[in-house]
Amino acid sequence: MINFFRQIRNVFKESHAPLQQILLSRRAFFRLLGYLGTCTLLIVVAQNC
């Protein structure tokens, strides 16, 4: 399974310039934070109802 993720990472590295990798990683990170924040907010609201 770990080998699968390494292969995906290698494909990603070969298809993007270093600056593009940084920008895409940053965008993905902030989208993940937004998703987790939304999940947390919905859980808190659901518990308080």
Image (tube, rainbow, N blue to C red):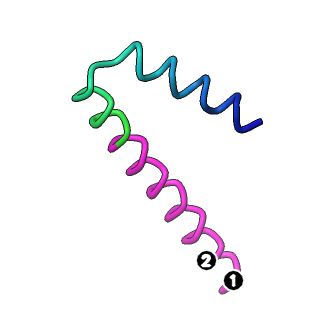
- The residue depicted at 41 percent of the width and 49 percent of the height is 29
Residue at the far left in the pictured view:
19
Between residue 8 and residue 43, name the one nearer to us. 8
The relative height of residue 17 versus residue 38 in the rendered view (above or below) is above
Q: In which image quadrant can residue 41 be found?
A: bottom right
Judge the density around disc 2: few (<14), some (14-19), many (≥20) Cα neighbours within 10 Å: few
The circle on residue 45 is: 2
**Residue range of the region highlighted in magenta in the rendering:** 26-49
The relative height of residue 31 versus residue 15 in the rendered view (above or below) is below
- The residue depicted at 77 percent of the width and 36 percent of the height is 1
- The residue depicted at 59 percent of the width and 24 percent of the height is 8
Between residue 2 and residue 37, name the one nearer to us. 2
Horizontal and vertical percent position of residue 47: 70, 83
Q: Is 31 included in the stretch rendered in magenta?
A: yes
- The residue depicted at 34 percent of the width and 18 percent of the height is 16
User: Badge 1 is on which residue?
Assistant: 49
* Element on which disc 2 rests: helix
Horizontal and vertical percent position of residue 4: 70, 28
> Would residue 39 be found to the left or right of residue 27 on screen?
right
The relative height of residue 14 versus residue 23 in the rendered view (above or below) is above
The relative height of residue 21 versus residue 47 in the rendered view (above or below) is above
Residue at the far right in the pictured view:
1
Q: Is 41 included in the stretch rendered in magenta?
A: yes
Whether residues under marks 1 and 2 lie with C-beta atoms below 8 angstroms apart, the answer is: yes
